Amino acid sequence: MTVDLDRIASLLHQRQPGYSLPQPFYNDPDVLAFDLESVFGTSWLLAGFEAEVPDPGSAMVFTVGRGSVIVLRDRDGVLRAFHNTCRHRGSQILPDGCTKVSRLTCPYHQWTYGLDGCLLGAARMPSGFDRAAHGLAPVHLETVAGTIYVCLADDPPQFASFRAALEPLLAPHDLGRAKVAVTLDVVERANWKLVMENARECYHCPAGHPDLRVSFPMDYSGSLGADENARSIAFSQRMAALGLGVGPLEGAWWQVARFALHDGCVSISPDGKSVSRIPLCAAGRGDVGSLRWALEPNDFCHAAGDYVMAFSAMPTGPEETLVRLKFLVHKDAEAGIDYDPERLIQTWNRTNDQDRDLAQNNQRGVNSAGYRPGPYSEDAESNVMRFVDWYCDKSRRFIEARHRRMETIGS
Amino acid sequence: MTVDLDRIASLLHQRQPGYSLPQPFYNDPDVLAFDLESVFGTSWLLAGFEAEVPDPGSAMVFTVGRGSVIVLRDRDGVLRAFHNTCRHRGSQILPDGCTKVSRLTCPYHQWTYGLDGCLLGAARMPSGFDRAAHGLAPVHLETVAGTIYVCLADDPPQFASFRAALEPLLAPHDLGRAKVAVTLDVVERANWKLVMENARECYHCPAGHPDLRVSFPMDYSGSLGADENARSIAFSQRMAALGLGVGPLEGAWWQVARFALHDGCVSISPDGKSVSRIPLCAAGRGDVGSLRWALEPNDFCHAAGDYVMAFSAMPTGPEETLVRLKFLVHKDAEAGIDYDPERLIQTWNRTNDQDRDLAQNNQRGVNSAGYRPGPYSEDAESNVMRFVDWYCDKSRRFIEARHRRMETIGS
Amino acid sequence: MTVDLDRIASLLHQRQPGYSLPQPFYNDPDVLAFDLESVFGTSWLLAGFEAEVPDPGSAMVFTVGRGSVIVLRDRDGVLRAFHNTCRHRGSQILPDGCTKVSRLTCPYHQWTYGLDGCLLGAARMPSGFDRAAHGLAPVHLETVAGTIYVCLADDPPQFASFRAALEPLLAPHDLGRAKVAVTLDVVERANWKLVMENARECYHCPAGHPDLRVSFPMDYSGSLGADENARSIAFSQRMAALGLGVGPLEGAWWQVARFALHDGCVSISPDGKSVSRIPLCAAGRGDVGSLRWALEPNDFCHAAGDYVMAFSAMPTGPEETLVRLKFLVHKDAEAGIDYDPERLIQTWNRTNDQDRDLAQNNQRGVNSAGYRPGPYSEDAESNVMRFVDWYCDKSRRFIEARHRRMETIGS
């Protein structure tokens, strides 16, 4: 990275607590380069679901920034992740998407790796060539109740607390029996932080999301400290009776909570009714509210009784972000019979398009010479503040670590 | 701005008087970032016409660089300008184009401002929230005889001399009774300075502009010091008899002059005849030559007796410029009856397309490793020299002011 | 150039011999700017063929980086090259492509130059204007047996050894009687060095190029030191009997060698048979193997008995390269009668498309955060190592020369 870290540090220093970020954080190419390394290169990212790599040899490619990671299940059924770049001349090994392989063969010069990443064959290399030193570079991988996370850092953040929080709440949704029914990609011409600030509040929902409003409580903030009103107490008690936890629980970079949908609603759908006839969560006949879990920097998921929606945002430029939505239903559910794919995605698809327009409009305004960071609402934007504070803290610590490393090297 | 000002200063130092600019001024992204702040951020820019915001609540959005400005008429009929960015999270408030509003409501979280820019409402903000400190950021605005100018700087250049010069010459064209009949946008893949150098000389006109040649004197330089030949003396005397001034007058960043069209021509049109049956300028039955006014960095206008054409060039990239032409006729003139829109724009539209090709070809050649700044013709390119000298002077003064400010801060 | 040369020097220092380059060499905009000046600005580049500029006044435009060069034949039949940028305001003078001219007239203000580059006319310039000082900037040009090379540097690399090597081997192919039958342009979304590394090895050929495999020896490395096996000895003897040299010969930036095609093959074609009925090389009835000559940084050519294919790669962005293939046949050969244009280009066209896919896939993998430079095969990638070593050496010497020049200026 050739980014001037002193400049980033200076920009971070300019940031006023409780206020949105200075302009360059939202449109500067150098800040994006910094973000990709300091944030996306060091955080746990939702890569997908075990259902996407069900069998030995199943593999999928997960794009992170400008490169990609192979997630595969090895011959022993163990999930592994590797950088998707050949140790010879760096060619991408697997194309995007899901596939099934017995070995990993680079399409360029046919260097061949086992499913454990070991280099098995490399033609025309000298006899003394050290194959053992040229295996695929591994990437840290963790799973929780059927969900898969990867981290590119050598020394990832502690994962155990997140697992301990999510596992018991998500396990009843039985994602081991799920399949990805639909994947939706949307390109937003907005910086990834504007996309995520949008995704972290519902202050804009009453006016902005008529579809979501049908089933989704607009005042839900997703954070600790939600009003312990009569309705949420009743919901907690009903869930407890079903053996389902509700949280809320949170760590520095994650949040987990089950919350009640509108009365009479069992799913986030056009009419609040179930959109898949075969529930994922058997408890309560599918009437279990919505389990939300969110990870900084770029993910949130909602598991209702009948389906799961997973959202992730990946920067593709200083003012461009690829948002990917995955919708999971029970693997026995048949499209057209047990669920209507259009209806399955309708609420989130429309909501997502509305969010894209808002984020792009936000980007245009933030680019103005007259833009000044503005104050967040502590009531309505607590999770935005949480996200931005986390980003600033993560960035500061990254810069400090770099400086320390240089001091160590220099001393 | 993270641009290295010392580098810009060094490039300015390299510039040889009387010669075109060193290559980076025409294609370097850092120079463009500098230009947007140092030149477009500190100059008076033609935003449009009072006819575009006729009534209380009329508003239009004027794009400057990467952001935009709202120009509106408040409840008292007073014109005001504001940065088009919400004080909450920076979202653009009004979309591009003209509209009519009673309040300014941000589409993101419905923060609402009065037409005077004051923040009237902001839901879910804490009780102690200081609304008065979060009004829309105002932008300086001036008007002259129906034309509107804005300046983003805190301390704009003196405007009075320009008004004093233009007002008496333009007032007889009665733009209060005008309407914008056609707006034309052309994207040119050329640096804005190449577009403006092209717009500041007619050296290329004899070969390049067969349409303009019909009515327009090819040797007209637009500057002071035009030959006071018999023809121009006769024109001045005829105008004086009609009570119309001719100038020429000029200040550091503006020029105003009325000049004679070719004999027998009363308009800049395919045959020199009027293209609108209802004249804007009643004097002389519309036979009043053409009143040209031009502002550095990016505008020029021509007012014949029957219509006004306003040209402005806005950088959209180091090698891309958006040129916008507006054509105004009498507001009572009906399209298809009193004027043919095709014929109204024909001469300038074709001329503009020819200029786009010339500017793009200029850009390609300037990008060559073999490009060296070349000598301007003092005879044929005096206004190009004026533009380039003004640009260099403005840029130098901007850098000096920055350095002074830092010294003050540092001392 | 505003590129930080210390950073480039540091990156060059990081490069491990025998390994591919550090990531920024393959995707960094600053490195590309450096390459255009340090490599493309100082090397001999194949501009085309004398057959493209046959007569006095024939001219063609050759694009180099962001600018272009005019190659023309003057009134005396002498080939000359000039930067394609007017000495007035830098406009491009000739459009892309081939043309015939009596003078060079800039389309902007009609400054006119002779075919020797002298400024003949410039309207409205003052009487004392020094025309002699404003001729077109010349570019070094050399020819070898009908091929044309230009170098933008003031002080080009020594050319004589290359000419001495290529002239006797290429002369029998009689390119003076050739014509360009087809030109193919392909845009590859890959850094030019990845395109050239691909072009400098056949390690990928067995799996990657089924079409080329028909006639082309997959183990041919193009370098000195090819196995002097029985087959190649027999080929050399047969060529010697025809009066044709085989080499191999090489200098720091060029290679020349004639090699045997597969037994029974006389051309690089879908079936190894000739694709043009009128041979260019009369010797051996066209059965003369293939004469390959290659220049660093960006060219290679193959002359079989019946046709010549010339490949060149020109960077158009950090991750974009324009590859141009020219196919030459005898000038008396008629399309549809003596050669089928589709069949003429088929093998190289398909091979080139396959290479584009490989290079683009290589780029995607190199952009990964997990990319690490990998080891080249000395057996299979000797010419890739040669290319990369040459590039690093050229780059280091460029930086040293800049530093020396500054020291001289500073002392």
Image (cartoon, coloured by chain):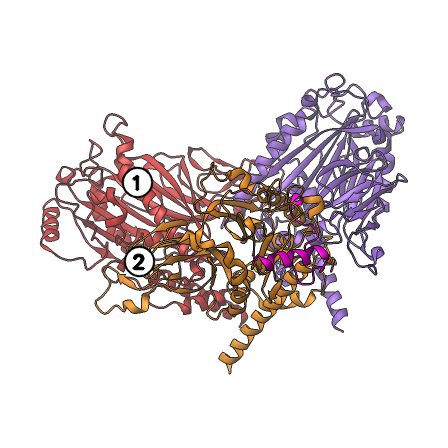
Chain colours: A orange, B purple, C red
Residue C59 position (above or below residue A239): above
Q: Quadrant of residue B254?
A: top right
Q: Of the residues shown, which amino acid type is indicated by label 1? A: Arg
What segment carries the magenta color? Answer: A213-242
Q: In this view, does C308 lie to the left or right of C125?
A: left
Q: Residue most toward the front? A: A241
Q: Mark 2 lies on which chain?
A: C
Q: Of the residues shown, which amino acid type is indicated by label 2? A: Val
* Nearer to us in this view, C241 or C370: C370
Q: Residue at x 54, y 69 (%)?
A: A161
Judged by depth in the image, the label closer to the viewer, 2 or 1, is 1
Q: In which quarter of the image is residue B34?
A: bottom right
Residue C177 position (above or below residue C361): above
Residue A280 position (above or below residue C403): above
Q: Which residue is drawn at 68% across and 31% down?
A: B218
Give the residue at mark 1. C350
Res. C384 mark: 2
Nearer the N terminus, badge 2 or badge 1? 1
Q: Quadrant of residue B229?
A: top right
Does the magenta segment cover residue C391? Answer: no
Q: Identify the element where label 2 is drawn.
A: helix
Q: Identify the element where label 1 is drawn.
A: helix
Pinpoint residue C141: horizontal percent, then vertical percent.
37, 48
